[in-house]
Image (cartoon, rainbow, N blue to C red):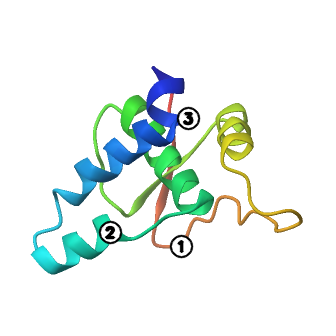
Amino acid sequence: MFANLVLTKTGLDYSRYLYSRSITDDAEREAYNNRVIGNKEYRHLAYKSFVNLMASQHRGKSVRYLLPACVVNTIRQEFPNPGGVPYSGFVCLDSQEALTLD
């Protein structure tokens, strides 16, 4: 399930479609759906998809999850940055809560 939903562009395109259904403005939804995305966007969709698979409930945008290193590394291998470009890593703002998925 992890490989099919989180590590394939087909699975992530489906997740992207589901997210787009929550966009209420028609023009904004169409722009979101028509935008060509690259590895960075696929990587972020993969992180979000993994959290959705593992989290018992959605806690909103103000809550961030610390992902296991094996998950982060696997997603980065599948959707790498261009050579030499560093990854931003986990960033948690003071106003956000960070949770683990245990």
Q: Nearer the viewer, residue 47 or 36?
A: 36
Q: Name the residue under label 2.
A: 34
Q: Mark 2 or mark 3, which is nearer to you?
A: 2
Residue furthest right in the image:
84
The secondary structure type at the circle numbered 1 is loop
**Relative height, residue 2 to residue 11 (above, below):** above
Amino acid residing under circle 3:
Leu
**Relative height, residue 13 to residue 37 (above, below):** above
Q: How crowded is mark 1: few (under 14 residues within 10 Å), some or many (20 or more)?
A: few
Residue furthest bottom in the image:
27
The secondary structure type at the circle numbered 2 is helix
Disc 1 and disc 3: Cα gap in Å? 31 Å
Residue 19 position, x and y percent, is 26, 54
Amino acid residing under circle 1:
Asp
85 left or right of 27 in image: right
Disc 1 and disc 2: Cα gap in Å? 34 Å
Q: Residues within 10 Å of mark 3 (few under 14, many from 20)?
A: many
Q: How many marks?
A: 3
Q: Kindly identify which numbered label has been placed on residue 94.
A: 1
* Mark earlier in primary sequence (2, 3): 3
1 and 3 marks in contact (CB < 8 Å): no
* Mark earlier in primary sequence (1, 2): 2
94 left or right of 52 in image: right
Amino acid residing under circle 2:
Asn
Q: Mark 1 or mark 2, which is nearer to you?
A: 2
14 left or right of 46 in image: left
Residue 41 position, x and y percent, is 52, 61
Disc 2 and disc 3: Cα gap in Å? 21 Å
Q: Kindly identify which numbered label has been placed on residue 7.
A: 3
Q: Mark 1 or mark 3, which is nearer to you?
A: 3
The secondary structure type at the circle numbered 3 is loop
